[in-house]
Image (cartoon, rainbow, N blue to C red):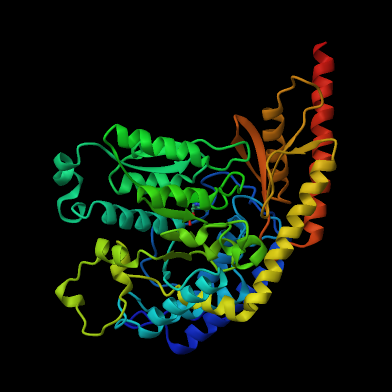
């Protein structure tokens, strides 16, 4: 082990030999981590503050050898992470930082380019355009869509709605809302279903229309936006002198993965001249399978679409792609070229497409993941997850102890434990069940509230997940349910 003292007079980077030694060790550690991640508890069994308590409060005055730092990483940091790459990480939306993605991130860190302008990193910018166009083709979208990469879907949705604002109210660019308030009269408003992600509200407060500028449209019993209610709400706002300008439809909502009727929503948007943004952050990746894409008819009518390859396309966080046919509006909304950033090339400069100037080299990992697995390989993996979800849903449906509480169009199952007796507190039972399974360290599931009831979400989508992980989790759910029901009966009996 290289524990050589650090050169106190040094003014440069790590010497080449030390860098190579540290990188080699880091590579070994990363590979060991990935090979053994399934044997770790998914959630670390620690209390808040436990990690900080093991680390010195003061930063070191003198540099330390990389080996010592890597030792501390291995002992103190790595075991106390929540293991998103664990095969039984079933919470939120299951994700994978896949092998080709990890390789790409390593190289992106080494090159450390900033792809704000074509000039500042030609290959990174051109690769970004190329891989976004690959995705466009994989989703069977028309050529007008141009893509770029953001950190998260929240950012992609924010810039899409800023472009929508620019299309409808170009005066806001220079005057802001206050400057155009008098000519406007009423309020600027957008629409999304009551199941839409909170990032829509966050975008609304950031672009200055406030959360009350978001009309929440009712859903049907399958949690899909009701397009008739949408049309009514738009008409109502127009009558009141307000200014509708955008609709966010969701393809794969966060709670139940329901898909809004994009075709019918697009009808309303075209008639009313509203920007249509489709939030397909999770399910958009699966739409590279034609049979899944068929669940989203009308997607090709959107002004903008967001999908997160860092969710279900096996790219390490962060990587969110915004595809838009409103590219010019997006550029007009954000382009603001300082003299020192001016260049002569007739090229796309990604800094013109959003609030940020500096941008990480995210296209590399998307490119390597698509090349390494191939489109067919990606489809095969997604179809496997779809099959696993159907299997889990069938087993839960057939069980005495459980019921499936929403349709399962993709890889996420919403279910709930049925109480043994009528009137027993099912919400408490379901929370207790999730708590027990998460404490066991064997799987990580999340509760959510749907129609005022606590339900459990089981999201499948990690490349390490095997059928045995589904079977094992089903068995664990059944035995914990029996245990909880037994306990419930005893306490009911005790009270009688
Ligand atoms: C995950 C998700 C988001 C938020 O994604 P971030 O990349 O974390 O901002 C938004 N909408 C939907 C439908 C999602 O599933």
Apparent side of residue 401 relative to residue 176 in the rendered image (left or right) = right
Q: In this view, does 460 lie above or below 488?
A: below
Q: Can residue 356 be seen in this view?
A: no
Q: Tell me which residue sits at (51%, 48%) in the image.
A: 264
Q: Tell me which residue sits at (79%, 24%) in the image.
A: 488
Q: Examine the image and state in which quarter residue 128 appears.
A: bottom left
Q: Quadrant of the C terminus?
A: top right
Apparent side of residue 415 relative to residue 92 in the rendered image (left or right) = right
Q: Examine the image and state in which quarter residue 192 appears.
A: top left
Q: Position of residue 127 (x, y in %)?
A: 44, 81
Frontmost residue, 342 versus 45: 342
Apparent side of residue 475 relative to residue 251 in the rendered image (left or right) = right
Q: Where is residue 282 in the image (x, y as percent from the top left)?
A: 56, 57
Q: In this view, does 280 lie above or below 202?
A: below
Q: Tell me which residue sits at (36%, 67%) in the image.
A: 61
Frontmost residue, 204 versus 240: 240
Q: Is residue 243 above or below residue 472?
A: above
Q: Where is residue 360 in the image (x, y as percent from the top left)?
A: 40, 71
Residue at the limit of the structure toward the bottom, as seen here:
17
């Amino acid at each position: 082990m290289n524990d050589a003292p650090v050169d106190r007079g040094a003014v440069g980077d790590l010497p080449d030999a030390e860098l190579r030694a540290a990188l080699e060790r880091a590579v070994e550690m990363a590979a060991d981590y990935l090979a053994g991640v399934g044997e770790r508890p998914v959630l670390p069994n620690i209390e808040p503050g436990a990690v900080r308590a093991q680390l010195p409060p003061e930063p070191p005055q003198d540099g330390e050898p990389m080996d010592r730092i890597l030792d501390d990483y291995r002992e103190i940091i790595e075991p106390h992470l929540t293991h998103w790459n664990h095969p039984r990480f079933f919470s939120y939306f299951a994700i994978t930082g896949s092998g080709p993605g990890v390789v790409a991130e390593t190289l992106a860190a080494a090159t450390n380019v900033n792809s704000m302008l074509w000039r500042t990193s030609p290959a990174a910018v051109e690769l970004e355009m190329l891989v976004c166009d690959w995705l466009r083709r994989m989703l069977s979208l028309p050529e007008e869509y141009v893509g770029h990469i953001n950190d998260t879907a929240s950012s992609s949705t924010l810039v899409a709605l800023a472009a929508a604002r620019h299309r409808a109210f170009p005066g806001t660019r220079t005057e802001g809302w206050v400057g155009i308030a008098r000519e406007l009269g009423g309020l600027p408003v957008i629409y999304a279903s009551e199941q839409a992600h909170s990032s829509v509200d966050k975008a609304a407060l950031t672009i200055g229309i406030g959360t009350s500028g978001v009309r929440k449209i009712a859903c049907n019993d399958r949690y899909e936006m009701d397009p008739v209610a949408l049309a009514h709400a738009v008409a109502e706002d127009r009558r009141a002198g307000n200014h509708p300008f955008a609709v966010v439809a969701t393809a794969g909502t966060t709670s139940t993965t329901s898909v809004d009727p994009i075709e019918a929503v697009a009808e309303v948007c075209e008639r009313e001249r509203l920007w249509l943004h489709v939030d397909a952050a999770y399910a958009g990746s699966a739409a590279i399978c034609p049979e899944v894409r068929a669940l989203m008819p009308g997607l090709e009518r959107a002004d903008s679409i967001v999908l997160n390859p860092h969710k279900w396309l096996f790219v390490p966080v962060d990587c969110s792609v915004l595809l838009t046919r409103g590219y010019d509006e997006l550029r007009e909304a954000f382009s603001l070229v300082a003299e020192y950033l001016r260049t002569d090339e007739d090229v796309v400069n990604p800094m013109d497409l959003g609030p940020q100037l500096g941008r990480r080299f995210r296209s590399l990992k998307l490119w390597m993941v698509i090349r390494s697995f191939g489109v067919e390989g990606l489809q095969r993996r997604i179809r496997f997850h779809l099959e696993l979800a159907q299997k889990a849903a069938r087993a839960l449906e057939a069980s005495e102890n459980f019921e499936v509480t929403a349709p399962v169009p993709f890889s996420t199952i919403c279910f709930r434990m049925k109480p043994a007796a009528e009137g027993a507190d099912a919400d408490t039972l379901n929370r207790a069940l999730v708590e027990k399974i998460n404490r066991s360290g064997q799987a990580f599931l999340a509760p959510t509230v749907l129609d005022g009831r606590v339900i459990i979400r089981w999201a499948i989508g990690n490349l390490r997940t095997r059928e045995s992980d589904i079977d094992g989790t089903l068995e664990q759910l059944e035995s914990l349910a029996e245990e909880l029901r037994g306990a419930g009966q005893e306490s009911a009996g005790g009270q009688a």
